[in-house]
Image (cartoon, grey):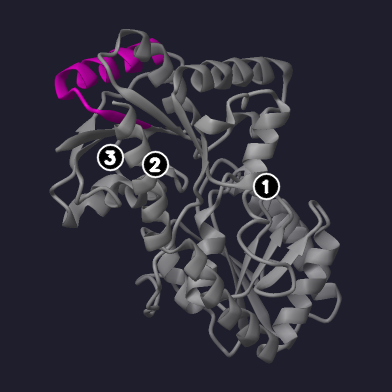
């Protein structure tokens, strides 16, 4: 039987571990699988019901010591002798690229869960991320992009010369049967329309735009409503202070971290997602599957997920005033929310595990045909 090794740099924050797990499950019937990473947090939870997939935990090292992680990966590859190595994310890509000079025969697939160049904010980071991606793209035989936006972006930087090596396979989402939400989270109730943000509280997510949009909505006739911001991250304190400065604390809640934030979709009426950039975020897909309308910024990795005016609204990037106006519109119109939610459930079928699995199994057949 074919042996597949999946490698992700760290099983920590973000949707990468969940996407990796979804991909790995598509090969359960045709391959023996192993997953290697640091941390084993989300993956350990996901793997609890599937002992067939073996997890390998790497020691914690400084993020600068890529060569240490390359040695760990190299040793594991020599031990397992996989036919195919799926590498997930930029940090994993550079680790794999460095180790690949010493690999035994093994086909390398880079799944670009996160493109580091999107978050480049100074010259040093630009050069560092450019070189990391350049090496990664050169050393991996196959490249999987999750969205058209990311593919266009990397093409502009000259990373995609050989189109035959490229595959476009979006993330997938399961059909949702919504429950009662996460235990231990207290909601205000009282018949309010609830808007929900799910994500890490970091610069990329632009929760500051969301708070400005919410204040604008309150000033422009927002009916009884509540904004719930789920997640933790480096900007928690800054965002709490901003909420106080904008005088919106009464209607904006920060419950913090929950183990299964996707379950909180059962408690909301609308999903809000002001992210500056994504690869192909799970949050809009989960909103579609849950039958919840979405308001999102027009960002790479988001705009491809749904159609403006059909399953939700796509707002020009950074225009928090228009974002706030759409908040008011959906808060006041229950029929529109239900109509968009119903269309969302239909749209989610395009991103089913079955569709995703068929694409990855086709890729695996093409890879094995070369062996």
- What's the distance in space between the residues labelled 2 and 1, CA to CA? 24 Å
Residue placed most toward the observer, 125 or 150: 150
Q: Secondary structure at mark 1?
A: loop
- Name the image quarter holding residue 190: bottom right
Say which residue label 2 marks. 363
Who comes first in sequence, dot 2 or dot 3? 3
x 44%, y 56%: residue: 257
x 42%, y 50%: residue: 359
Is 177 positioned to the left or the right of 294 in the image?
left
In magenta, the rendered stretch is 66-86
Within the magenta stretch, is there residue 72? yes
- Name the image quarter holding residue 371: top left
Q: Secondary structure at mark 2?
A: helix
- Give residue 210's position: percent from left, percent from top: 71, 59
- What's the distance in space between the residues labelled 3 and 1, CA to CA? 28 Å
Give the mark toward the camera: 2 or 1.
2
Who comes first in sequence, dot 3 or dot 1? 3
Q: Which mark is residue 20?
A: none
| 15 up-or-down from 366: above or below | below
Say which residue label 1 marks. 300
Q: Which mark is residue 40?
A: 3
Q: Secondary structure at mark 3?
A: loop
Residue placed most toward the observer, 102 or 257: 102
Q: Main secondary structure of the magenta part?
A: helix
Q: Residues within 10 Å of mark 3 (few under 14, many from 20)?
A: many
x 18%, y 54%: residue: 48
Is 150 positioned to the left or the right of 107 in the image?
right
- Tell whether label 1 touches label 2 (CB within 8 Å): no
């Amino acid at each position: 039987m074919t042996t597949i090794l999946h490698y992700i740099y760290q099983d920590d924050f973000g949707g990468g571990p969940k996407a990796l797990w979804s991909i790995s499950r598509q090969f359960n019937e045709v391959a023996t699988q192993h997953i290697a990473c640091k941390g084993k947090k989300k993956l350990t939870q996901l793997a609890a019901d599937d002992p067939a997939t073996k997890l390998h935990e790497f020691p914690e090292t400084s993020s600068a010591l890529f060569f240490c992680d390359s040695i760990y990966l190299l040793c594991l590859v020599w031990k397992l002798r996989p036919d195919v190595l799926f590498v997930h994310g930029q940090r994993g890509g550079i680790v794999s690229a460095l180790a690949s000079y010493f690999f035994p025969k093994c086909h390398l697939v880079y799944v670009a869960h996160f493109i580091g160049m999107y978050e480049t904010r100074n010259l040093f980071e630009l050069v560092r991320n450019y070189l990391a991606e350049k090496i990664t793209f050169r050393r991996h035989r196959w490249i999987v992009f999750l969205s058209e936006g990311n593919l266009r972006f990397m093409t502009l930087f000259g990373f995609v010369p050989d189109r035959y090596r490229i595959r476009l396979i979006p993330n997938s989402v399961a059909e949702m049967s919504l429950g009662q939400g996460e235990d231990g989270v207290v909601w205000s109730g009282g018949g309010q329309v609830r808007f929900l943000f799910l994500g890490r509280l970091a610069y990329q997510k632009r929760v500051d735009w969301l708070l400005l949009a919410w204040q604008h909505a309150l000033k422009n006739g927002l009916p009884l409503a509540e904004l719930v911001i789920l997640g933790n991250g480096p900007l928690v304190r800054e965002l709490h202070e901003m909420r106080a400065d904008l005088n919106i604390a009464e209607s904006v809640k920060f419950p913090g971290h929950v183990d299964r934030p996707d379950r909180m979709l059962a408690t909301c009426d609308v999903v809000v997602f002001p992210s500056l950039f994504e690869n192909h975020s799970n949050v809009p897909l989960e909103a579609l599957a849950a039958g919840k309308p979405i308001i999102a910024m027009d960002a790479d990795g988001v705009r491809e997920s749904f159609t403006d005016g059909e399953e939700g609204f796509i707002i020009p990037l950074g225009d928090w005033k228009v974002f706030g106006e759409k908040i008011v519109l959906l808060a006041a119109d229950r029929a529109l929310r239900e109509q968009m939610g119903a269309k969302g459930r239909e749209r989610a079928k395009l991103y089913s595990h079955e569709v995703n699995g068929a694409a990855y199994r086709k890729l695996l057949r093409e890879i094995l045909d070369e062996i």
